[in-house]
Structure formats: structure tokens, C-alpha cells
Amino acid sequence: MLSSVLAAITCIAIPVSDPLEISAQMKPDQAPVEVGTYVTATSFRSRNFSNVNQLLVFGAAGVPTPVLVTLPPGGIVQYDFAPQALDGVMLEVVSLRGGVMTTSGEHVLALPAGSVDQSLWTVPAASGLVTWQQLGCEVTLLPPQGSFLPAGLASTGSGTEAATAPPMPPIAVPRSTLSPWVQSKITPM
């Protein structure tokens, strides 16, 4: 409970100029975030925090072939576009680790009504990748809406599995806004 309160206070008190500067922080006994994605009305940015290639799969209704973008370890991709260009666009994160392919499933990229931005945090879980959606300081588990991949090719996190999804939502805490003394006390994940 105390950690949730501290996370909320931190989120509100520290302005975030670069939401993908560092990975969202998970509880020490949980898998770390693999991919962070930040979306505004006119920009998309995704960063790979893991040590394996990640595949970003973009698609939309009526578009027969999805667009595939490889995101190398530590890599960042960024796109700028006209407002409303993301209407109908879906994103799926696919990971191949230890010969096992996992996927986050498809997620809508367009901003929810009334939001100026959102962050999506993709985290490994027992049955696949799960995605957390962060709107301001509010973080919720985001269930997938299907998959671009053929059935049975990869395991997908359901977004509803409480036992395998992290119990504490990730919170982005930009290191650059913290004092050097506080930065020295934080153990990198």
C-alpha cells in the first residue's frame, strides 16, 4: 500500500519531460518492462528496454498486410504524423526469447477521448506479454483485441490473468529530474 501511495505522489510531483528516458519501474520480484511506447496526437515513440530484438507490428482494418518494424535491444523508433492519423491503427509487440514467441496482442494506438498522451508498457507474463496503459498517473492493465499473428504461432497474455500480471502498475520516474544523491541510491533494473 505504501509503495502505491509513494508511486502516485512521485508521478504527480515529478514532471516527466521524456516518458521513455528510463523503463517504468516494476516491483523487484516482477519481470521488467521490455518495451515502452509513448503516443501523442501527432507522434509515436517506442523503446526496447530488453536485451532481445522486439518486433512492432502495425495494422489497421482494411489493410491486408501489417507493417513490421524491428526494434533492436536499446533501440528507439519514432514517427511524427498528422492528427487523427492513428485512428484505426493497432500495435502488437512480438518477442522471441529462448525459442519461444510471445505477443502482447493488438492494442489501439489512438488516444482515448480526453487524453493528450498515453504510455504503453509491455511486460512478460506467464502466458505471453501483457500491456499496461498509463494515462497521466492512472495505470491499468490493457487487454488485447486479437492478434495479427496466425492462431497458435505465439502465446498472448490475456490482460486479465491476475496471477501472472504485475500486481503493482509501472510508474515512469525520470532519473534526470532526481538529485544526484537520489540517483545513486536507485538500483537499475
Image: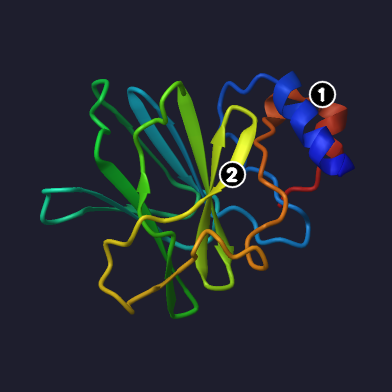
Q: Secondary structure at mark 1?
A: loop
Nearer the observer, 40 or 160: 160
Residue where numbered disc 2 is placed:
140
Q: Amino acid at mark 1?
A: Ser
Which disc number belongs to residue 20?
none
- Residue 89 % position (x, y): 26, 41
Residue where numbered disc 1 is placed:
179
Q: Say which residue appears at 58% left-offset and 34% top-offset.
A: 21
Q: Secondary structure at mark 2?
A: strand
How far apart are labels 1 and 2 at the CA level? 29 Å
Q: Nearer the viewer, mark 1 or mark 2?
A: 2
Snapshot quadrant of residue 84: top left
**Residue 117 sits above or below residue 67 on the image:** above
Q: Residues within 10 Å of mark 1 (few under 14, many from 20)?
A: few
Q: Say which residue appears at 27% left-offset and 21% top-offset.
A: 83
**Residue 184 sits above or below residue 157 on the image:** above
Nearest to N terminus: mark 1 or mark 2? 2
Contact (Cβ within 8 Å) of mark 1 with mark 2: no
Nearer the observer, 12 or 160: 160
Q: Say which residue appears at 67% left-offset and 38% top-offset.
A: 171
Q: Is residue 158 left or right of residue 40?
A: right
Nearer the observer, 158 or 155: 158
Q: Is residue 99 left or right of residue 109?
A: right
Q: Amino acid at mark 2?
A: Thr
Would residue 55 be seen by someone viewing this image from the given angle?
no
The quarter in which the N terminus is drawn is: top right
